[in-house]
Image (tube, rainbow, N blue to C red):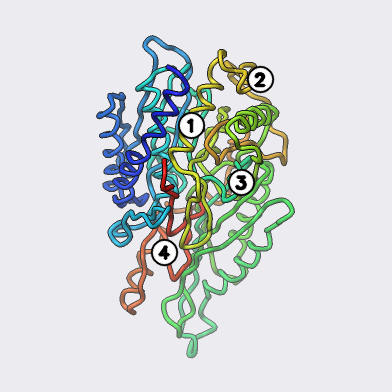
Amino acid sequence: MSQAQITDWLATQRQAMIDLLRDVVNIDSGSYDKEGVDAVGARFERHFAEHGIPFRRESHGTFGDAIHAEVAKPGSNEKPVLLMGHRDTVFGKGEAGRRPFTIQGTRAYGPGVADMKSGVVMNIFVATAFHKFGGNPHPIKLLITSDEEIGSPSSRPVIEREGRSARAVFNSEPGRPTGNIVTGRKGGIFMHFAITGKAAHSGANFAAGLSAIGELAHKIVHIHALTDLDKGITLNVGLVSGGQSVNTTAPYAEGQIDLRYVDPADRARVMTAIETIIATPYVPGTSAMLTVKGEFVPVVQSADSNALFENYQAAAKQAGLTTLQGEFSGGCADSGFTAAVGRRPSAGSARSADLRTRRRNISSSTASCRARRRWRWRFCGGSRTHSAVMPGLSRLRGRSRFGEAKPGHPRLSGNRGCAWMAGSSPAMTRREPSRIARRIRPAEDLDGVARHDRMAAEHGIGVEREIGDRERANRVEGPGRDAFHHCSIAVPAGG
């Protein structure tokens, strides 16, 4: 096997990548749509079967199954490199039919094309190339999960287990608009709170009522006041609902909270403050309950991850990427889970732009180009023979643990197509006990989304369900991480 064989073959696979991407984008696979998510998994399994790559499913009764595949040398007992990605999207049933995969000029559009079906396709073709030509110094494992957009409730233990057994992890989330990589990520906690008041006629019996909406308003003001932009702490109550009629004091109200933070030490302090706000009745007589619906841990730097980033920059320069820099992202991803169990993750497929609009897109780099660049890191970084291309990487091979993270310094995560990153201390994943949690009903009992969907239908208001929440007008919220609407991936006219 030669480098030229791998890169030349990947360069010929542009149309095959587009065909596979078209097939999976045209299947609805919202996080709560197990049938659709598993159908996307079946299409990927078909590719594995056609190319003789061993694969298996890890079943889950509620969410989509986890898909595992492996390219390994016979008799190899080396720790694998893990290629990771998710196949669920933020879109509801029918979106693929309304907006199927299409190519307009040099861009392809469709639900989930950027986040992150193109990244999974890239990982699959990299693994396929090594299966076809050999030469991978370590086994390559693929993990394709099913529920990242809602915080990976079923996939997190699978991700952590596979991360612990891997030597490095590549998570192919979309790249940055600038083409740079992400060198750190915020942690995120996604919460629901429900308030109970007392209904009374707002004209005839006002004094007997207890307004849950009034209580909700007080809590929102106090929660938002916890924001500290200098420390990277943001609080957003992005969804609210409540009340039963305009002439009745509201007997119930609810909201959803998005907390983002950089320093793991800030988590416990802010959560304690939120719990205190929820437990404090600003309208006497009301009560409230808090539920944590999902959580991502932050990606924080260490000395080892910095060294790996420098190795990546060196390899990138040899590939012609001479201006590459690191960026910090306020978004969350599954790479935080693998970092927290002591494995260096990288994330990145094609470059994306317009991250907060209905026309999210990926600019000039194609999946096939990124696959060739990612292959370069794996081949050169994973072999002592080629360690000159990634200077110093061989010194890090075989380490089972990494140094403690420095507070306030983001750990490397990647969003361009190559590699890097030491994991964090296991202490970073310790979850502080919640005083409120012991007296909280299950989250599904508190969800008022279905009630509001019925109300909207009765009044002729258009509503589209999306990852368990509502989409209204041009705004999209998701409890798991930033959610986006329309997506595109660049498809150059040539190879």
Q: Nearer the viewer, residue 269 or 132?
A: 132
Q: Residue at x 58, y 36 (%)?
A: 429
C-alpha span from label 2 to label 4: 49 Å
Q: Earlier in the sequence, mark 1 or mark 3?
A: 1
Report crowding for label 1: few under 14, some 14 to 19, many 20 or more residues within 10 A (C-alpha): many
Horizontal side of residue 460 vs 376, given as left or right: left
Q: Amino acid at mark 3?
A: Lys
Q: How many marks?
A: 4
- What residue would you read off at disc 2? 392
Residue 493, which numbered label?
Answer: none
Quarter of the image where one finds residue 140: top left
Circles 3 and 2 in contact, beta carbons < 8 Å: no
Q: Is residue 457 above or below residue 410?
A: below
- What residue would you read off at disc 3? 186
- What residue would you read off at disc 1? 160
Q: Nearer the viewer, residue 73 or 78?
A: 73
Task: Return the residue found at the far front.
Answer: 494
For marks 2 and 1, give the one nearer the viewer.
Answer: 2
Circles 1 and 3 in contact, beta carbons < 8 Å: no
Residue 470, which numbered label?
Answer: 4
**In terms of secondary structure, where does tag 4 sit?**
strand
Residue 51, image x, y percentages? 28, 27
Q: Amino acid at mark 4?
A: Arg
Residue 367, image x, y percentages? 44, 41
Q: Earlier in the sequence, mark 3 or mark 2?
A: 3
Report crowding for label 4: few under 14, some 14 to 19, many 20 or more residues within 10 A (C-alpha): some
